Image: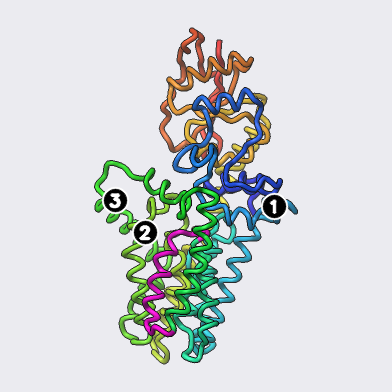
Amino acid sequence: LAPMDVFYTGDAGLKSLLIEQLARGDVRPQLELPAPPWVRALWSEGFQPFGPPFVYDEPAPGTVSFPIYFSLLCAPFYALAGLRAALLVPLLALWGVWLQVWRLCRVRGLGPWQTNAALAIVILASPLTLYGAILWEHTLGVLLFTFAIEALYAREQASSLQLMKLGVLAGLGVAVRSELYVPLALITLAIGIPKRALPFALGVGASVLAVWALNLALYGKPLGMHGAQVLDAQDSTPFVTRVLERARSMDTKLVSTMPATLLALYVGIRKPDARRALAVLLLSLLVIPLIVPNDGIRQIGPRYYLFLVPLIALVAVEDRGARWQPVALGALVLLGLRFDVLRATNELVRDYRSERLPALAALRSAPQPVLVVERQETAQELASLFAHKHMLRADDTHQLAELSDRLAAQGHRSFLLVRFQRDPSKIDDALTTPAGHSVSVVQARTLGAFALRAMQTR
């Protein structure tokens, strides 16, 4: 587990701050960071560490864009034993996915070797497993979506009540992962027979309406803040160009990190029994890039496609009796194993221990009480330092000059300026403030993924 509150991605750091707040009993989607009045005053003047597309001022200042529900689940664990306990939620959800895949193999009447092959694909040859060690809600979303897959594969004797229950459980997935609206609608259509599709759709609809009602109460919008996040992610590039580039990036990552996808496509075309699942898979690949704000950016595999992992595994082992299938499955599992267990695990360990940990340790022990970041993503990565430092943000030289005067007025003439080493700085090493003070670098160094500059105002 992550040492010293190290996070694979920045928004996991933001989640940890909200989880900590919820664990204290402050149950609302607005982030309220502890800080003295003069720091809060600077935040209100535009030097706040977070902003769109992660934190908004509507419907109230500090509203976090991601849904609160995953953080609410993690909060009781955090209250008991901190971040390591909160990470039990994605881990337990991951184990639940494995159990569901085993159950679905039994529902399909698959033999022992096919069941073992499906589990090997999900556990060893897909990106999903590593998300059990990251403070993200993806494994929980995938677990809830497996109930939709169960409805798709349900035997004819399944009752309307059973299908409705599966719909209720599957529909709850939209509370944590908004891209699940698409495959849930597709599976409802793929079930086909009205007397079977209708109970499932009613169950999904009940959960979706409940989520919308909660979102309306918390955010003033039925879909929560996801719509605002998508809009803020837009740029001047034409919509079609963005979608095509997004799809290319996500599809390439899916095939490269989960080679069993290719076998699932082949089996889905050959086997009539697998074509409904194949239709859900293909249409999801077409539609998801239209509704997500980006291609996933920093991720292991295509995170917006993770819900497809159990479906891909089940379709890939569907060709019963084919002599070539054990060899093909073995080769594809080994290819996926090479990525997930070796390369991606190595990346996680490097990030936790080498890239982030040295900077956290150094910044925590630094004598300067004020930490200024150049980008909000840096503040998210350093979320655990909010309890030790006064964190502010300056995006360029002009803003830092103004901030330096404000800090000098509070008696803080020395502060640390931090950015990701990979990002070019927009702040000069020497500048003059509006009040005529000179600000310059007295020490510069690199720690892991971060570049640090100790600044002095004279």
151 is higher (above) or lower (below) than 143: below
Majority secondary structure in the magenta region: helix
The magenta-colored residue range is 175-195
Q: Nearer the viewer, residue 355 or 24?
A: 24
Q: Nearer the viewer, mark 3 or mark 2?
A: 3
Q: In the displayed image of the protein, which residue is found farthest to the top?
A: 436
Tell me how many marks there are. Answer: 3
Percent of width and height locating residue 299: 46, 54
Residue designated by label 3:
242
In the image: residue 224, left or right of residue 30: left
Q: Quadrant of residue 214?
A: bottom right
Identity, as a three-letter code, of the amino acid under mark 3 = Arg
Residue at the disc numbered 1: 78
The residue at the point 45 percent across, 55 percent down is: 223
Label 1 neighbour load within 10 Å: few <14, some 14-19, many 20+ = many
- Look at label 2 and name its amino acid: Met
Which residue is farthest right? 80
- Of 40 and 437, which appears nearest the observer? 40
